[in-house]
Structures are given as C-alpha cells and as structure tokens.
Image (tube, rainbow, N blue to C red):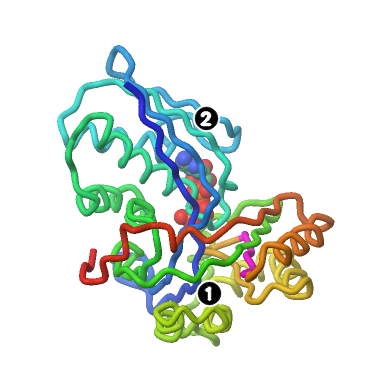
C-alpha cells in the first residue's frame, strides 16, 4: 500500500513576540496562512521494520534528523507500531526559508501514516503529537488560516484571505530560526503588528486591510544580519506589490498582489536580483478544515 500527501508551505501575515518565557521560548502571536507551494510526501509499506527516507533535495538531512523521519518514529512509538515504511520527499519548498517546509513535511507524514496504517487519529490528536516535533507542526497538520499563540501550537481558526497571488523571493542563504530569536530583544521592539486589525481585515475579506497590517517583529533582526533581505523587500515594493513582508524568521520575502499578470511582472523584475522567485496562489481559502469557527484547536 502507498499514500501520497501534499505538504504546503505557510507564510506569516503577522508575527509578534510578546515576551520571553521561563522555558526560554518566546510567547508568540502570529497569523499564518497556507500557500500553494508544496512538497509531496509518498509513504509506502516495506518489509522489515526500518524507516527508509529518500528525498530529492541535497539540502535536508537524509536520516533521523529529518522532521518527516521523526514524525514517523514518534507515531510508531506512541501507537506501538512495528511496521516499516519508506518515506519519499519531493522537495519544492525552499529550505531554512521561513516557510515551515520541514514542519509541513512532518505534518504530512503524520496525516499520511494515519491513513496508511488506518490509525483513526483525529487531526487534534495528530496536531498534539506534532507539537512534540516542532512549534509549527500543529498548524501544518491543520493548514488553512489561523491565529497561533504560545510557541505557535495554540491555534484558533481565522477567516482565510481572499484569493490573491503571493510572490516569494528567497535569498541564497538560509536562516537559523534559533539564531534570529536569540538576537531578538523583546523590550526593544519598536514596531509591532496589530494582530487584532489583521484578524478583522481577514474576517471582512478586506484585501487592502490585510496588505496594510502585515507585520513581523523578526524582520528587523534578520535584516540586520542579512541586508539582502531589506534590499529584496524594497525591490518587491518598487515593482508594485500591494503589501510586502518577510515570512517567519526569514529570509524569504513575500509580496501580495491581486492579479496574476502583476504577479508575473514582479517575478520577472526580481529574477535579476534573486534566483529563487515564485508566484503562487493563496491556499488558505481552499482548506475547509479550519472553517468551522466554533472550534478552538
Ligand atoms: P520555520 O518557518 O518553521 O522556522 P523554516 O522554513 O525556516 O522553518 P525548514 O525548511 O523547515 O526551515 O528547515 C529548517 C531546518 O530543518 C533545516 O536546516 C533542515 O536541515 C532541517 N530539516 C529537517 N527535516 C527537514 C525537512 N523535511 N525539510 C526541510 N528541512 C528539514
């Protein structure tokens, strides 16, 4: 038996760090949404009890450090399963980019193995397991659009953005999320996003409001480390994106655009400055999972 699962990337429409907690993590408040840039995970039964990993990218670990491997291992332990599995990762999401590629691979592995092994676990249960692998994994288990609090694992569904285009530009280097958070001084943050206003704009389907309220307190920190991120943001604004922000801890910069033709123009303009440029659709609006507003995950 074999199953295939899509693992979409996310972007942060907002990211705020409220304070540093006693456990060393920052207390976060983020609005995240899924975009149509995805890895594909194939899961196949094999003889024996090994977890075998194959991937199309030379940039991610091929062993037990891979988050997809860890997801399979954790699920097997918790459910007392001894079956072997081959995990194949077709990588499209840029690595160490602020797009949660690894977390999404782990989440897709949990969802896919739940089907392959007919475990009957709910998404709530898979998200809870996912939190042990990484803070962004629970969101990726659900996908869609959500307000994330705590380390990112406490999720409340939010209305999806209206259909639009997302132009992404990823500088050559990757960024270590831990390093960026270490450099962040929460007491010195000068401009914070207005999370409430972003949620309101989403609820009202107010595209311009969404563009206006994009904000990420890590942007300043990563830009200090990598000035190229600032240059890319400026270029994206010059080429006419309606709203521009760095996603997560970066270094990927994204721009929102309402029409495909404009997205294509911006992509063409950016190609001279950056090798990894994409134009994709928002996916937040295609995911029914989070639309049941009565449920806090
Ligand atoms: P986030 O936005 O959640 O901080 P990110 O997009 O910045 O994540 P990832 O692409 O998830 O970063 O990769 C972070 C690190 O995790 C990489 O250095 C990589 O070596 C490791 N990693 C482990 N498994 C994977 C995987 N399946 N895909 C990508 N990276 C992985």
Indicate whether 293 appears above or below 192: above
Establish whether ligand 1 lies closer than 8 Å to the Cβ of label 2.
yes
List the residue tagged with mark 2. 55
Query: Residue 205 in the image: x percent, y percent?
Result: 46, 78
Total labels drawn:
2
Indicate whether 45 appears above or below 249: above
Q: Residue at x 40, y 38 (%)?
A: 5
Residue 294 numbered tag: none
Span of residues in magenta: 251-256
Determine the main secondary structure of the stretch shown in magenta: strand
Q: Residue at x 48, y 74 (%)?
A: 14
Q: Toward the viewer: 8 or 160?
A: 160
**SS state under label 2:** strand
Q: Residue at x 25, y 47 (%)?
A: 126
- In the rendered image, the quadrant that contains the C terminus is bottom left
Q: Do labels 2 and 1 touch, CB within 8 Å?
A: no
- In the rendered image, the quadrant that contains the N terminus is top left
Query: Residue 47 in the image: x percent, y percent?
Result: 30, 12
User: Real-space Cα distance between discs 2 and 1?
Assistant: 32 Å
> Could you tell which of marks 2 and 1 lies nearer the N-terminus?
2
Q: Residues within 10 Å of mark 2 (few under 14, many from 20)?
A: some
In the rendered view, does 182 fall on the left or right side of 22?
A: right
Q: Toward the viewer: 18 or 118?
A: 118
**Residue 174 is covered by the magenta coloring:** no
Q: Residues within 10 Å of mark 1 (few under 14, many from 20)?
A: many
Query: Residue 204 in the image: x percent, y percent?
Result: 43, 82
List the residue tagged with mark 1. 216
Indicate whether 204 appears above or below 86: below
In the rendered view, does 238 fall on the left or right side of 38?
A: right
Q: Residue 191 sits in which quadrant?
A: bottom right
Q: Residue at x 33, y 47 (%)?
A: 133
């Amino acid at each position: 038996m074999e199953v295939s699962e899509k693992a979409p990337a996310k972007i942060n429409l907002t990211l705020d760090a409220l304070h540093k907690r006693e456990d060393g993590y920052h207390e976060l408040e983020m609005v995240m949404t899924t975009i149509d840039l995805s890895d594909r995970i194939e899961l196949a039964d094999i003889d024996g009890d090994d977890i075998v990993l194959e991937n199309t990218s030379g940039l991610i670990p091929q062993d037990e450090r891979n988050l997809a491997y860890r997801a399979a291992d954790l699920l097997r332990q918790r459910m007392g399963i001894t079956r072997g599995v081959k995990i194949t990762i077709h990588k499209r999401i840029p690595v160490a980019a602020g797009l949660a590629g690894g977390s999404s691979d782990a989440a897709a592995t949990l969802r896919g193995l739940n089907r392959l092994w007919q475990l009957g676990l709910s998404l709530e249960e898979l998200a809870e397991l996912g939190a042990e692998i990484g803070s962004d994994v629970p969101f990726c288990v659900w996908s869609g659009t959500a307000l994330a609090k705590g380390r990112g694992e406490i999720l409340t569904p939010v209305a999806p953005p209206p259909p639009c285009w997302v132009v992404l530009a990823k500088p050559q280097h990757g960024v270590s999320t831990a390093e960026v958070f270490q450099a962040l001084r929460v007491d010195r943050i000068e401009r914070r996003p207005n999370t409430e206003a972003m949620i309101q704009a989403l609820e009202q389907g107010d595209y311009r409001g969404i563009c206006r309220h994009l904000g990420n307190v890590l942007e300043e920190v990563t830009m200090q480390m990598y000035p190229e991120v600032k240059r890319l943001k400026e270029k994206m604004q010059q080429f006419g994106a309606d709203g521009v922000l760095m996603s997560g801890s970066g270094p990927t910069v994204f721009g929102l655009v309402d029409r495909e033709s404009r997205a294509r123009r911006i992509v063409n303009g950016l190609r001279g400055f950056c090798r990894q440029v994409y134009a994709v659709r928002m996916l937040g609006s295609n995911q029914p999972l989070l639309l049941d507003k009565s449920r806090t995950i």
